[in-house]
Image (cartoon, rainbow, N blue to C red):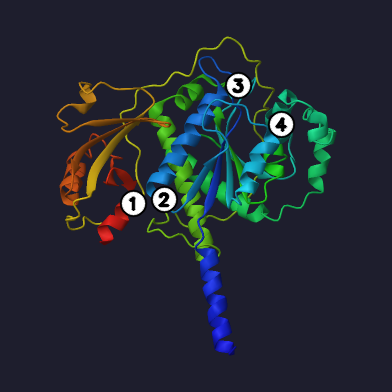
Amino acid sequence: MQLKNILSLAAAVLVSISCQAFTIVLDAGHGGNDAGAVGLMSKEKNINLRHALLVGDMIKERNPEIKVIFTRDKDVFIELNERARIANRNKADLFVSIHTNSSKNKAANGIETFSLGVSRSKENMEVAMLENSVILLEDDHESKYQGFDPNSTDSYIMFEFMKDEYSQRSISCADYIQTKLLDSSGRADRGVRQAGFLVLRATAMPAVLIELGFISNKEEEKALNDDNKQIENAEAIYKGIIDYIHSLERKGEHILNSDTPSTTPSPTPKAEETAIPAVDAKPAESATPAIVATPAVVATPAVVEQVQASPATDDVDVIYKLQILVSSKQHSPSDPIFKGINRLEESKEAVGYKYFCGASKNYNEVMALKDSLKDRFNGAFIVAYKNGVRVNVQETLKK
């Protein structure tokens, strides 16, 4: 075979590999009989699940070329090792574990994002101990985790000798997500950090763990249970993930079959160690009311919809709709927030209740509706259905 043909074949193979579906595993921490941290009105397991489902829903809606897998999509207990196995079995490209922090110091607050590494501060060690203590709920955890004791600092010595080949990518991804969460929430920055998390240890891909805030802090717990704030947090995590993927594209390490733009310049990867209030053991689960959510009046913003209005399609099979709201609470069609809106539709999905309006075969008509509602639903975006099946808006417009 001539050298030219060999090179062409090699190039084709590389393009094929780079265009394979990017796979993300979203891990909602805790679940089932493991409530995680318990606040005054909610439990960590519910907050984590709500955020994971929202992020996954955003990815599926805007980037259907990305494969999304949940370690859990309902209130069930999943062992830490199994969470990593799910990611490894599916040959995931990224593992994102979502958690909520707690402290005896009721003033402790802020967001932090971790990658696997050595806990070089007391605070980081305590966060890792907090999250790793879940293995004590597992049967035969001594043998499963080779005698690892989550409450003994001696057990964490092993992380000194672990070589994580995905360390830089993990730190980079953590930095993108942390930046977006801070920009969105305006909350305190506890930094991008490293610590010995068992759930990250066995993953064979870049992996990060997000601590969304403190359920032990009255104000932060309220925000963590508010529909609007949950959507904002999920949007920030989504944007951070997309920016991370685009950073890989710029390096030629992966190519998304998508027009989704990067939302921010590349940050300089860093792992900070800063002094923060001590984080203590999570409170024992008690009789705590179920999660309380505030009715949402803000729709999930869309990054992928940043396109010019295209000519109306004549494809009779395609129906365009405007998604104006995602809420954990069901709203009546007569709710004042829907005043003046015609052709309102409701869809009950895992992530909550979705509300659409303006169903039409004419894209420009729905775009005009979107513009008219921007003051009320600034984050509304257009979705498309073909023969009743959700399809990519961009693909329909290319036709």
Q: Amino acid at mark 3?
A: Ala
Extreme residue toward the bottom, this view: 2
Against 142, residue 41 (above or below) is: above
Question: Residue at 60% across / 23% down in the picture?
Answer: 32
> Of the residues under marks 1 and 2, which one precedes in the sequence?
2
Q: Amino acid at mark 1?
A: Asn
Residue 185 visible in the displayed image: no
Location of residue 40 in the rendering, given as x and y in whole percent from the top left corner: 53, 14
- Mark 2 or 3: in front is 2
Per the image, the residue denoted by label 1 is: 392
- Occupied quadrant, residue 294: top left
- Left or right: residue 348 versus residue 72 is left
Inter-mark Cα distance, 4 to 2: 33 Å
- Contact (Cβ within 8 Å) of mark 1 with mark 2: yes
Q: Secondary structure at mark 1?
A: loop
Q: Secondary structure at mark 3?
A: loop
Question: Residue at 59% across / 50% down in the picture?
Answer: 92
Residue 29 visible in the displayed image: yes
> Of the residues under marks 3 and 1, which one precedes in the sequence?
3
Per the image, the residue denoted by label 2 is: 64
